[in-house]
């Protein structure tokens, strides 16, 4: 599957499935991974993340409205859920989720893990960053004339933790992309991505960072 392929629509619950609890959380807040409950994101964005010794973070997944989080797949030891933005979630007993919805949610987690692993193996790092931005734009962004607007509001630090590099490197590469006309930074950590990136990513940026 191409990194820039359209991600399937979020999973809709049948009308008889009601949440057992709602929860509002703020940016930076950590959520528990409960043994018998799944979190459905109603609004906002959340990442699955682990912290290594020394406080270094590694992002394992980025999730948005309609996605389910919880013990869909065996969790990595120390994995936590961190709100990237203010978010509202519904807690739903795993046993109430129909098999087809549970299967789709599990498949979505596995596909995202494979996609992020593929991105992490891109070289040079400039291509890795652009592949991440393209994937995020197609998954969470809005298509506009001549490109996409990504309103995920990721900080440079969060982006760096998603592709295994440093905040300084991400800042430098984004400045390079902007000079090339491939990316334009908007207010509040939003980005415009030129539609040319999908076809030309493997040829435009040859600078090794």
Image (cartoon, rainbow, N blue to C red):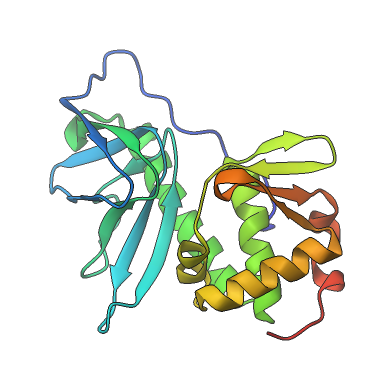
Q: Quadrant of the C terminus?
A: bottom right
Residue drawn where x is 34% and y is 37% of the image: 87
The residue lying furthest to the top in this view is 15
Decide: is 20 above or below 117. Answer: above
x then y, percent, for residue 172 = 66, 74
x then y, percent, for residue 141 = 62, 40
The residue lying furthest to the front in this view is 187
Decide: is 127 above or below 60. Answer: below
| Between 65 and 5, the one nearer to me in the picture | 65
The answer to whether residue 7 is visible is no
Left or right of residue 169, residue 41 in this image: left
Residue drawn where x is 49% and y is 58% of the image: 155
The answer to whether residue 196 is visible is yes
Q: Quadrant of residue 125?
A: bottom right
Residue drawn where x is 77% and y is 61% of the image: 178
Left or right of residue 8, residue 33 in this image: left
Residue drawn where x is 43% and y is 40% of the image: 104
Q: Quadrant of the N terminus?
A: bottom right
| Between 32 and 55, the one nearer to me in the picture | 55
Decide: is 108 above or below 55. Answer: above
x then y, percent, for residue 39 = 26, 38
Q: How many marks?
A: 0
x then y, percent, for residue 101 = 37, 33
| Between 169 and 142, the one nearer to me in the picture | 169
Left or right of residue 89, residue 184 in this image: right
């Amino acid at each position: 599957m191409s990194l820039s392929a359209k991600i399937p629509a979020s999973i809709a619950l049948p009308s008889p499935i009601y949440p057992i609890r709602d929860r509002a959380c703020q940016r930076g807040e950590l959520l528990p991974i409960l043994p018998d409950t799944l979190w459905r994101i109603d609004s906002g964005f959340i990442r699955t993340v682990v912290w290594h010794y020394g406080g270094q973070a590694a992002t394992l997944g980025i999730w948005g409205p309609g996605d389910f989080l919880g013990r869909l797949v065996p969790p990595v030891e120390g994995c936590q859920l961190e709100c990237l933005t203010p978010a509202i979630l519904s807690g739903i007993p795993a046993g109430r989720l129909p098999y087809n919805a549970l299967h789709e949610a599990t498949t979505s987690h596995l596909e995202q893990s494979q996609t992020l692993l593929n991105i992490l193996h891109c070289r040079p790092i400039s291509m890795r960053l652009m592949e991440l931005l393209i994937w995020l734009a197609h998954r969470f962004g809005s298509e506009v004339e001549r490109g996409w607007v990504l309103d995920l509001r990721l900080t440079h630090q969060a982006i760096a933790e998603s592709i295994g590099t440093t905040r300084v490197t991400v800042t430098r590469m984004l400045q390079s992309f902007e000079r090339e006309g491939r990316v334009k930074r908007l207010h509040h950590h939003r980005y415009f991505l030129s539609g040319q990136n999908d076809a030309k990513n493997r040829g435009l940026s040859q600078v090794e960072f």
